[in-house]
Image (cartoon, rainbow, N blue to C red):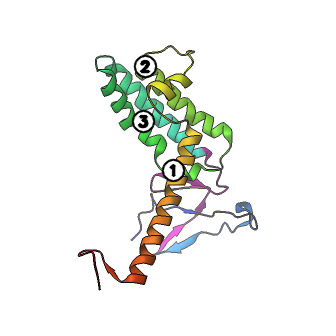
Amino acid sequence: MLPKSVTRMGHLGTFDSPSNQLSTVPLEVCGVRVPPTGTVRDLGILLEADMQMTCHVRQLVSRCFRQLRLIKSCIRSLPFETEKTAVACFVITQVDRCNSLLAGTPKCLLDRLQSVLNSAARLVCNRQKYDHVTPLLRDRLHWLLVQYRIDYKLARLQVSSWCCTGLSKIILHWGVDIESTSVI
């Protein structure tokens, strides 16, 4: 039986058939009527019918700023490296999680995410609200800007897919037994 409160169905549009032209008829699954909605959550990511990612970014920014407010109360008593690690664990990992889905999103959304990194850098380095933050990100914290983080993630995914594809071709061609590393 499907739990009615957490079951959602979303239509994702393409360039050929935009989401506003799709059917709004509820789908029946296991006796439960599931009406289509404009936003669905999958693996913690909010996906919208128009794939603009605005709801996801809005919720992510809100969650990250909440974490920064919670961390701010106790971070002053910690050494710099510990502060940096705490912010990285609770905030930066949230920004980096599934950020490859943000490739191609408008700059205004990426700017909102960048404001999270900027605030985190000011908190860790004990700077004021209007202090310039780019040198802190680059020289002191060694953090990439949001757009570069997304580009890096995409490049890393591409390289890992090439490596896995190349490894599978070698295994199939040569018959390599991975456990004993001997030729079959």
Q: Name the residue under label 3.
A: 91
Residue displayed at 67% across by 39% down: 107
Image quarter of the N terminus: bottom left
- In the picture, measured across the screen, residue 82 lies left or right of residue 4, that is left
In reply to whether residue 45 is colored magenta, the answer given is yes
Disc 3 element: helix
Disc 1 element: helix
Residue 181: name its quadrant.
Answer: bottom left
Query: Marks 1 and 3, how far apart in space?
Result: 17 Å
Name above or below for residue 20 compared with residue 80.
Answer: below
The residue lying toward the viewer, choosing from 166 and 107, is 166
- Magenta-colored span: 30-54
Image quarter of the C terminus: bottom left
The residue lying toward the viewer, choosing from 175 and 140, is 175
- In the picture, measured across the screen, residue 81 lies left or right of residue 42, that is left
Q: Which mark is residue 125?
A: 2
Q: Name the residue under label 1.
A: 153
Q: Callout 1 environment at 10 Å: few (<14), some (14 to 19), or many (20+)?
A: some
Residue 46 appears in the rendering? no
